[in-house]
Image: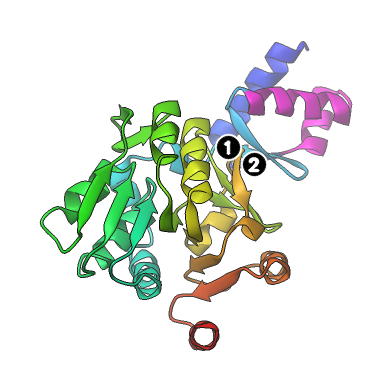
Amino acid sequence: MDATTRQNEIIELLNTQDRVEVEDLAQRFGVSLQTVRTDLRELSQRGALSRVHGGAVRVSSAATRAYADRRKLNAAGKLAMAAEAAELIPEDCSITLNIGTSTEQVARALSGHRGLTVISNNINIINMMMGGEARELILVGGAVRQSDGAIVGEDAVEFISRYKVDFAIIGASALDADGAIMDHDGREVSVARAILKNARTRVLVCDHSKFDRSAPVRICDVADLDVVITDAPVPNAFAEAARAAGTRIIVAGDTASQNERNEND
């Protein structure tokens, strides 16, 4: 069996199951483990699957799920995280928010804050904050992705680099227990990196389900963030990486994390 046939069969397998294992595939095809790893690496580079330890998983449904449907996922958790983020952000400051349903909820939670300067590559955020208490709303320039209203690409990166804001608030598609913050679209990741680079305080807002998902492009590591806001306790390895880097983790609704935040304030 040649590589093309094997790889097509791997894709077919992932259409019917969430994960494939290297050892199972090697036995199925009668090839070496290294041959299977090469197949998975090539498929990952083409965006057909996501590599994980010991195998590969179907490209997360978050990459293709209709944006409107994604807003409904874990709505209560997103509301709780947004409330925590709003507690961190003072009035009369500047913020940049990236594309995402969690960051949209943060924008809603900030609607009563006065004097904010808000920059976003998310058309939805700018639209929902119009007519509110913000001092200024700035929509990032560039090509609009029609599926979700995101503005991505090099023009957006250059635009964001003109500013230096007080707070960056980003979301992500996947979190790894080792501290990696991941996403699917390289263009979107470039924008998220620019947002983080051009902010004094960097905040990630991500719910616990992102630890169960995989994405191929690294935005940053937990050590590159000042605050992580989530809705459930994080894996021990992630918590240890954050602790070693001095990154604060706030679990929405968790009294202990709230007390720690207040002590640090």
Q: Magenta residues?
A: 21-45
Q: Residue at x 58, y 72 (%)?
A: 248
In the structure shown, which secondary structural element does the residue marked by tag 1 occupy? strand
- Given residues 134 and 76, the one toward you in this image is 134
41 over 115 or under it: above or below = above
Scheme of image coloration: rainbow
Q: Do the residues labelled 2 and 1 touch (CB within 8 Å)?
A: yes
Three-letter amino acid code at the position of disc 2: Arg
- Provide the major secondary structure of the magenta segment: helix
Q: Position of residue 129 (x, y in %)?
A: 19, 55
> Within the image, what quadrant is residue 138 found in?
top left
The answer to whether residue 10 is visible is no
Q: Residue at x 50, y 75 (%)?
A: 251
The answer to whether residue 154 is visible is yes
Q: Which residue is drawn at 37% across and 52% down?
A: 97
Q: Who comes first in sequence, dot 2 or dot 1? A: 2
Residue 44 is one of the magenta-drawn residues: yes
Q: Judge left or right: residue 97 versus residue 177.
A: left
The N terminus is located in which quarter? Answer: top right
Q: Name the residue under label 1.
A: 58
Q: Position of residue 12 (x, y in %)?
A: 59, 26
Residue 176 is one of the magenta-drawn residues: no
CA separation, marks 2 and 1?
A: 6 Å
Three-letter amino acid code at the position of disc 1: Arg
- Label annotation for residue 19: 2
